Image: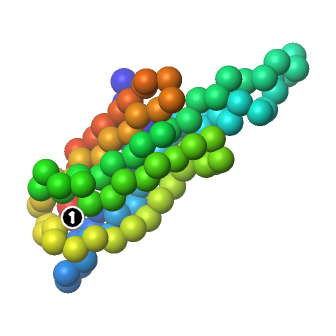
Amino acid sequence: MASSIRVRATASGESTEIQALIRHPMDSGFVKDASGKAIPPHYIQVLDFEHAGKVVFTALWGPAVSKDPYLKFQFKGAKKGDDLTVSWIDNKGEKDSSVVKIG
């Protein structure tokens, strides 16, 4: 199965810019399907970015985040060629992770 995580990590000077897009339904539990039944909640709860064994960014999300969330941030201390690990876990226990090289 292909990863649900797409990441672009670019080192420039002292900082590294991260752009991430995560395919996920992010259902709140308040929306109804065509037959009128509520779609059960299904959303990412924790999203982590790690560099050199250290967490550089953590997002604690809930049902208010939109479908296929995108985020962008910067951190210091990385260089081109380093690995960046991205992982998430949702309220149903599903998870995904991906390792990308910083460019």
Q: Residue tagged by mark 1?
A: 103
The percent position of residue 85, horizontal first and vertical second, equals 24, 47
Q: Is residue 88 above or below residue 21?
A: above
- Res. 101 visible in picture: no
> Tag 1, which secondary structure?
loop
Residue appearing at x 47%, y 59% in the figure: 71
- Camera-nearest residue between 10 and 86: 86
Q: Quadrant of residue 39?
A: top right
Look at the image and tell me in which quarter the N terminus lies: top left
Residue appearing at x 46%, y 49% in the figure: 60
Q: Is residue 57 above or below residue 78?
A: above
The percent position of residue 86, horizontal first and vertical second, equals 30, 46
The percent position of residue 72, horizontal first and vertical second, equals 44, 65
Is residue 39 shown left or right of residue 10? right
Amino acid type, label 1: Gly
The number of numbered discs placed on residues in the rendered structure image is: 1
- Camera-nearest residue between 11 and 89: 89
